[in-house]
């Protein structure tokens, strides 16, 4: 008996789509629980996304150094393997917890919720989620965050907002990182801002360098304003 390959492929496609829909619904359910828990303690939750190597961990270090005398901050870090990024952040004196995904290319709300009890949320003003370095999968998963911030390094080229539009559409801010390298790389800040705002006209933009400190004060001021707003 012959097998109708076209029919089998069609069924597989529909089944995959249904699985994705169910997965996202389950994720959103847990994300809502996280939002409610954060609201109880007035802890600001920020999801930091980017490609691998865009400077997320270094920005966390600089932020901790700048704000440690003003607020209480903590970080959960997602990576496929190792605790290296969390260890770097702990060197600044703040609590950092590593989530090892074991090959999964994004964090999900359930992963975040499972480790929340390892943070003293009653005494934390700002909790960062440093997501797995990837501009594709993390865009689809709400982690219960108040704000999503996407880093885009000058070393990546300036075409990312149009190539990966969902990430920029779902982000509240785009941080152009490694700004100190602008004189040495083919990157147009004007072009990337134009493209990002064509995708998401409400996205805020900051230009920073964790190496020379450019934009770090503005970044920290933005965070402090959001913390104050969350606390009401």
Image: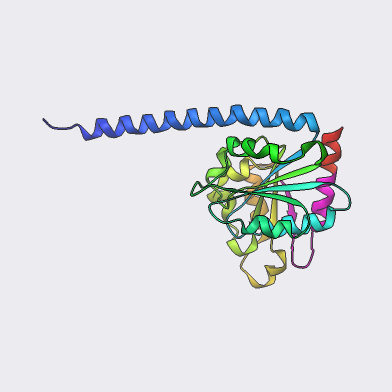
Q: Residue sitting at 74 percent across and 33 percent down?
A: 38
Q: Which image quadrant for residue 207? A: bottom right
Against 58, is 30 above or below? above
* Magenta residues, start to end: 204-224
Give coordinates of residue 133: x percent, y percent: 58, 53
Quadrant holding the N terminus: top left
Q: In this view, does 7 lie to the left or right of 56?
A: left
Residue 199 in sight: no
Q: Where is residue 98 in the image (x, y as percent from the top left)?
A: 63, 50
Q: Residue at x 79, y 52 (%)?
A: 219
Q: In this view, does 137 lie to the left or right of 203?
A: left
Visible in this render: residue 125? yes
Is residue 229 a member of the stretch shown in magenta? Answer: no
Say if the magenta span includes residue 218.
Answer: yes
Residue 163 in the image, given as x and y percentages of width and height:
53, 50
Task: Identify whether 71 is placed above or below 109.
Answer: below
Residue 165, image quadrant: top right
Relative to 203, say whether 61 is above or below. below
């Amino acid at each position: 008996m012959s097998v109708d390959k076209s029919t089998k492929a069609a069924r597989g496609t529909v089944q995959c789509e249904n699985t994705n829909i169910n997965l996202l619904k389950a994720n959103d359910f847990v994300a809502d629980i996280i939002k409610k828990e954060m609201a109880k303690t007035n802890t600001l939750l920020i999801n930091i996304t980017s490609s691998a190597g865009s400077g997320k961990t270094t920005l966390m270090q600089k932020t901790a150094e700048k704000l440690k005398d003003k607020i209480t901050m903590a970080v959960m870090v997602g990576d496929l393997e190792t605790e290296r990024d969390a260890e770097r952040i702990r060197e600044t004196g703040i609590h950092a917890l590593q989530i090892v995904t074991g090959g999964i290319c994004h964090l999900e709300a359930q992963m975040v919720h499972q480790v929340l009890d390892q943070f003293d949320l009653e005494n934390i003003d700002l909790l960062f989620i440093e997501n797995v370095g990837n501009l594709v999968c993390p865009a689809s998963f709400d982690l219960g965050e108040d704000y999503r911030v996407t880093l885009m390094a000058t070393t990546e080229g300036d075409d990312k907002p149009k190539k990966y539009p969902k990430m920029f559409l779902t982000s509240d801010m785009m941080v152009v990182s490694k700004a100190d390298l602008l004189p040495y790389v083919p990157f147009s800040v004007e072009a990337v801002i134009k493209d990002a705002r064509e995708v998401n006209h409400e996205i805020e933009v900051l230009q920073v360098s964790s190496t020379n400190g450019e934009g770090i004060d503005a970044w920290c001021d933005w965070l402090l304003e959001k913390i104050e707003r969350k606390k009401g």
